[in-house]
Image: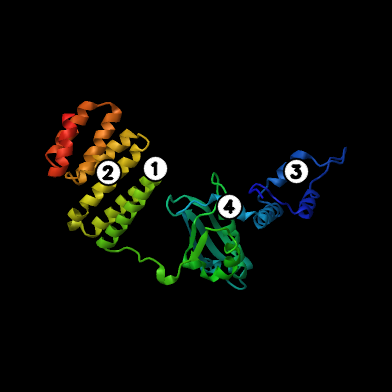
Amino acid sequence: MSSETIAFDHAAFQKLLATIPRNPATGDVDMNEMFSLLTDESNPAVRALSECAVLESLAAYDYAALALTIVPGTTWQAKLTDRGPMTDLVMCVGDIPPLLRQHHLLLECRDAATGVVRYHEDLLVDLPAASEAVLTFVRRCIALPAAPQSPALPSLLRFSDAFLPHASVLAPFLDTLPAPFKWYIASPSSRPKEPSTFDDFLHLAEALKESGNAAYARRERGAAVEAYTQGTQVLGLAIMRAPGRFPESARLGAVLLANRAAAHLLENAAEEALEDGLHAEGTDPTYVKGYMRQVRAYELLGDMGQRRAVLKRALGRVNAGDAVVVRSMLDS
């Protein structure tokens, strides 16, 4: 069944139409009045009709057909935050209104590599019904994601440990999805430690560099640039924790910048690559690839004079092995 197929509750639809005044001369429903009514999302009956249609569509969707969309190595990360009942936020006197007894849930599913959000939802639900609401959220992530994304399945859907109370409702659905799809809910003990020290942030920056390298190998400029950018930001946090240890981080900083320049060059974005190459040189003047990115950028810009100037500058700074390569380029 296509994700665009919507199944309406016809009885509810007819009941809604009955509220529209008819033309006294013809007895027909005025089309403008009908359009106005059906697009009025402030009307609870309209919202209920729309939600009913979505739920029926999701329940009837042919999830098995999505086996063809599974790309090896793709991972989605689903997160859930339960902010508790609204009574935690609002002071009540006397009887608590039912609305304020509902729990406030924030749900999000995103591609772990690209960071692109497939679907997010901000819900107020009664706690006994929360698991069904969470299941509907998961189905939406798969079959009705945010535009312009299409229905799909990842190789792995990874849930945070906050989903554990809903596992018994999620499992019967997730276990029916086609191979090679897999899923798991993290245990509280597997939750990663929040970085706090220089070494913590340094290791995280290294991991982001590797993520960027993987995206670069797939020739995905946007994802690679995003990972390398996050790496430089995390490295900045490391240096804030221990300014005296900047020399230990200089090479990694230059690598992240030079790699981001290389990602820009995937699409011949010379200006952006040149800027990152210059910053890489400033961060660690001994790192040859900072110069190489500038050389390629100047070639794309047609400025061979600046290309030569960069090579001359590198010659006196890089190690002996790299200097041989630089000299050969200078003589060519």
Amino acid type of disc 1? Arg
Q: For the residues marked 4 and 3, what is the alpha-carbon distance in whole angstroms?
A: 36 Å
Q: Earlier in the sequence, mark 4 or mark 1?
A: 4
The reply to whether the C-beta atoms of the residues labelled 4 and 3 are less than 8 Å apart is no
- Give the total number of marks visible in the rendering: 4
Residue 66's tag is 4
Under circle 1, the secondary element is: loop
Residue picked out by circle 1? 219
Q: For mark 2, what is the residue?
A: 258
Nearer-the-camera pick, 90 or 81: 81
Residue at coordinates 64% horizontally, 55% vertically from top-left? 58
Which x, y percent locates residue 166? 56, 68
Quadrant where the image shows the C terminus: top left
N-term mark: 2 or 4: 4
Residue 253, compared with residue 85, is above or below; it is: above
Mark 1 vs mark 2, CA separation in Å: 16 Å
Q: Which amino acid does label 4 sit on?
A: Leu
| Amino acid type, residue under disc 2 in the picture | Ala
Whether tag 2 and tag 4 are in contact, CB under 8 A, the answer is: no
